[in-house]
Structure formats: C-alpha cells, structure tokens
Image: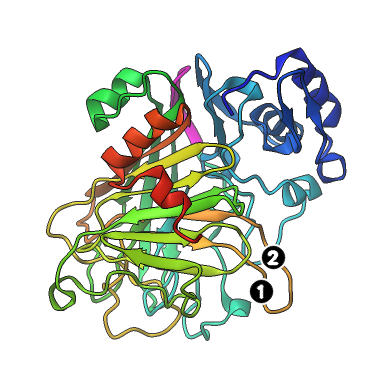
Amino acid sequence: MNKSYYLIFIILIVSSCGGSKQENKIVKTEKYMVSDSTKLYGYNKNFLKKYTSFVELKKDKSALLIVPAWQGRVMTSTAEGDSGFSFGWVNRDLIASGKLLPHINAYGGEERLWLGPEGGQFSIFFSKGKEFTFENWQTPPFIDTKPFIITSQSDTTISLECNEVIENYSGTVLSFGIKRDIILLSGKDLLNQQGIDISGLNFIAYSSKNTLINKGKNEWKKTSGLLSIWMLGMFIPSDSVVIAIPFREGDEKTLGIKVNDNYFGKISANRLKVTGNHIFLKADGKSRGKIGLNPLRAAGVMGSYDAENNILTLLISKLPENVTDYVNSSWQIQKNPYSGDALNSYNDGPLVDGSQMGPFYELETSSPAAALAPGKSISHTQTSIHLTGDKKLLNNISLKILGVSLDEIEKAFR
C-alpha cells in the first residue's frame, strides 16, 4: 500500500474505466504490481464519473467521493490519492447496467444512511399486514433512489438534506427531515477529537453528523413506533480481512449476551470468535452472517485489519450513556421492539440459490430510538478512519483504539 504507482497508473485507469468487462487490469511499475486496478481510487473515480455526479472532498492525498443522488453516501475514499487503495465497495455491475431493481438498489458505498426499524410491527420496509418475507421487503425510496439536496459545500465539507413522509407497518404516519453533514478531517482533528496520532502514516478520516427531525404535528411515541438513524458501511473483503470489536465485560444477567449472531442463523466457530473482551469475525465475503452488540455491551468502536494490504480501518461512534432503547429490526412481530443492537457487522456470502449481491463486508452503527416531540431532533455522529503505512505505528493505534494488536487480529482464525 505505501507505494507510488507513477504516471502509468493514470494511463491505465483512463483506458480501463469502461465497466465490468474491462476490470481486473494489471497495473505495473518497476517497484510494485497491483493485480486488480479496480481496487484503486482513481479507477473508481473515473468509473463513477461515467454514470453519476459526485462531490469530491479532498486535502493533500486524502479524498472521498460523495453521491448526492444516492442519499449523499460516501462511495469510496483514499489515503494516497488516485493511486491509493479504494476503501469502499462499489457495485460496478449494477451501476453500469443503469437499471433500477426491485427491493433495493445496492450501489455500494463505505458510508450510507438508512433509518430503522427494518422489521417488526413498526417497520418502514414492510407494508401494513404483509408477511415478513423477502418478496414483501422494500427499501423506502428516500434511502434507495431519491436524491438528497446539497445545501452547502466546500473543499472539505458538504451538507445535504431531504424531507419525507412515510407510513410504518402499524399504520402510523411519520413526517420527518434528514440532514447530513460530512467533514474531511485533518491529522490535527484526529489528534484533538480521538487522541489518534497519525504521524508517519497515510490516512483518510471523515466525520458525518446525521440528524433526524420530527416535522409532523404529533409526538413520536414508543406505542406507535419510533425511528432510528442507521449507518452502514460496505468494504472490500478478502481472506486476509478480520473484523475486531471490543465489548464491555460483565455478567450476562446485567449486560445481556456478548454477541448476537442469530440474524441469519448461528455463525460457526471458525468464523466467529470471542476472546477476552473482543469479538472477531472473518470478513472474506464467502459466508453470509451478521452479528450485533446491544448498547450495554457496545463500546462505540469497531474496526478491521486487512493483513494483505496492511490497512487498518476504524469506526468510532460515541453512544449516549444509559440509553437502552434501540429499534429491533428482526423480521417478525416482536415482544420487545426496542431491544435492538447499537453496533452491527455483516459478512456477505452466497444465498441458497447461489446468487450473491457482493461480496462485501459491513460495519454498522445506530442511534437510539427517537422519541421526538414536533420540531425536535436527534443526531448520530460517527468517524470513519483508514490508515496504511508502518505496521508498528498501525499496531500502536490498534492497541489504543481497539485494545488489541494487529497480530492478534491477523491470527484470530489461524
């Protein structure tokens, strides 16, 4: 990763950015070889330029691409300019097809905004009275195909918003606004805000503040259904990527189970491991599984390490203290619709019929359930960080933020 690709990279991405049939080009230099040019930021920037409009926030070698038409999602980012690794998963096949699909248009992106709950009696993904089956599941347009409007922007910041009215599964009509503010962070910002010293490393870091406003005339109550802010990031998997999530230790009677892996069925021990106060999950994109941490267990940080490319990814979201009402998104009528998880992670894999959306893996954070009076709002902020460079320096940061060494992460499933 900590290499230069010189002018030949630019020549190759310009000639090879024509979609999926031209992927997997070889990029060569005297010092380094990248076997897949689609994993480079410059390639994906040129690819997206053909199919949609984007805003690039940029400072020095740190940059990220935001697509307003896709709800202001961060599609991908880089720590080393156009010749650097492209950190977000981009669904090039779907984007290049120009098609709109039923259920969801999974364009990809390393940070996208959704609202919960997905399932249950207060779901906004299922119509009233419908069975909780995939055939009836529908992503609302405002988090799928409806553009967000830019309200302000600069070289390192952007603000977007949308307004919407939706009816939940129980028939409650909810009128709301969403504001999304994204800021590209400097090394000084990271040091001041997170205590992370990135001296000597390549980095990209950005913070997003996502605000949900009750624009209706009625108070949002637990008995009729609450919404939550739900942030999902899609990243590039491989056999060398392992997710690491620290959790708060304590008695299960008080804090609940350490990890919830019942979303799509139990995950096997060779893919999910709990050691000490850390959860490790393989992120190879080869087996579908999802985990969650409830708000009493979640420490507000999670990350992954790609040993092959020497990339440390961190996601930091400070959770409010002593708040335990998080929406439950399971696809069923629930006894406790506010017993959901605060942090989640997902590893993609083939479905029963052999088809697969990705492959990708996800890191997700959520806000508490939003019990809002008219005109009131709730905000959910998270910071996304990708670091490359000297492994000793990366290891120091991993120990500081995740509480675990890179070697421990790398060897979790060996």
Q: Secondary structure at mark 1?
A: loop
Position of residue 204 relative to residue 273, above or below, is: above
- 327 or 397, which lies in front? 397
Q: Which residue carries the number 2 mark?
A: 356
**Residue 371 in picture, x, y percent from top left:** 22, 61
Q: Amino acid at mark 1?
A: Leu
Mark 2, other Cα within 10 Å: few <14 / some 14–19 / many ≥20: some
In this rendering, the answer to whether 380 lies above or below 297 is above
Q: Is residue 50 left or right of residue 374?
A: right
Secondary structure mostly taken by the magenta-highlighted segment of the chain: strand
Q: What's drawn in magenta, residue-wise?
A: 149-157
Q: Residue at x 42, y 46 (%)?
A: 407
Residues at circles 2 and 1 in contact by the CB criterion of under 8 Å: yes
Q: Quadrant of residue 209?
A: top left
Q: Is residue 164 visible?
A: no
Type of amino acid under label 2: Gln
Count every numbered label the image shows and give the total: 2
Residue at (37% x, 74% y) in the render: 122
- Whether residue 37 appears in this view of the structure is yes
Which callout, 2 or 1, points at the residue further toward the start of the chain? 1
Q: Which mark is residue 48?
A: none
